[in-house]
Image (spheres, rainbow, N blue to C red):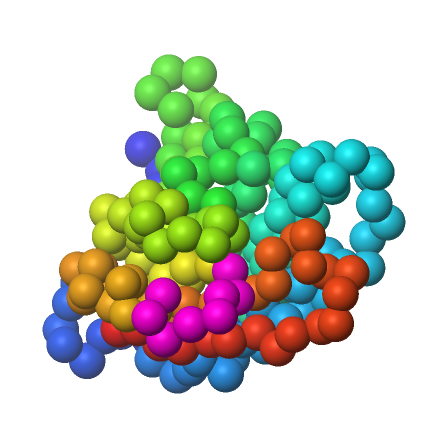
Amino acid sequence: MRQTMPPRIDFAASGSARPVDNLVLSIDAADVQSSVERALEAARGRPPESVDKRILHATRSRDFVAALGDQLGALYEEEADVRVFTKHDERNRAEFGMNELLYDVTVCRTTTVDAASSGKTLHYVTAPIWHVESELAKDSRQALFDFNKLVLGSAPLNVFVGPLVHDAASFLDVLRTPASCCQGRVFAALIPHPREWDQVRQPVHCEELK
């Protein structure tokens, strides 16, 4: 049975069997913040699809997630084995049977294997790179509901996107202990809630939690 395996950039100094991208070791909170800021600007630049506030806010959140997926995917644009999965992006559906792969954004490495009898080429995931979860309710309890998904994953790079709140330090402190349970590095990026996008622009707040 033929199987094509993608090349890797580097290997973990720890001796782990899983290859690690150079970005896993070199990226910092400023890099994550830049990606989030560019995604936010791209989403803000899209024309509103509805005057209904509930629909408008949901659409803005959707557009932001899609734009963040594009930003993270651009880091690997020269690497054909890297795929980006988001809920409303159908580019992977024909080969993987779905748009979204467990997380709001999943960036992962993939390869192929021959089907058992049909001779068709099947696609599968070999390793995660990024997992992103987003919850913009200004409520740390709601934040943890989504953050738990990052704990379950095995990506070396994780991002939780939450809301800008009055006391960011206290909000992030709630996430630090569960972040210590994640296998990889964990960043938190706090952005304005979509209902605040038409107001005075506030800077994105980004920190590495683990």
Q: In the picture shown, does residue 123 fall above or below 188?
A: above
5 horizontally vs 79: left or right? left
Q: Is residue 127 magenta?
A: no
Q: Residue at x 82, y 53 (%)?
A: 46
**In the image as oriented, which residue stretches furthest toward the top?**
117
Q: Position of residue 179 (x, y in %)?
A: 24, 63
Q: What is the quadrant of the N terminus in the image?
A: top left
Report the magenta residues as a range.
163-171
Question: In front here: 79 or 188?
Answer: 188
Question: In front here: 201 or 45?
Answer: 201
Question: In front here: 98 or 203?
Answer: 203
Kindly tell me whether residue 40 is visible in this rendering.
Answer: yes
Q: Quadrant of residue 196?
A: bottom right
Q: In the picture shown, does residue 59 fall above or below 14?
A: above
Kindly tell me whether residue 63 is visible in this rendering.
Answer: no
Total numbered circles: 0
Q: In the picture shown, does residue 141 fall above or below 36?
A: above
**In the image as oriented, which residue stretches furthest toward the front?**
166
Q: Residue at x 34, y 20 (%)?
A: 116
Q: Position of residue 23 (x, y in %)?
A: 42, 76
7 horizontally vs 15: left or right? right
Q: Is residue 166 magenta?
A: yes
Q: Position of residue 31 (x, y in %)?
A: 51, 79
Q: Position of residue 184 (x, y in %)?
A: 26, 65
Q: Quadrant of residue 173?
A: bottom left
64 horizontally vs 16: left or right? right
Q: Residue at x 41, y 62 (%)?
A: 159
**In the image as oriented, which residue stretches furthest toward the left?**
15
Q: What is the quadrant of the C terminus in the image?
A: bottom left
Q: Residue at x 84, y 38 (%)?
A: 51
Question: In front here: 166 or 129?
Answer: 166
164 horizontally vs 63: left or right? left
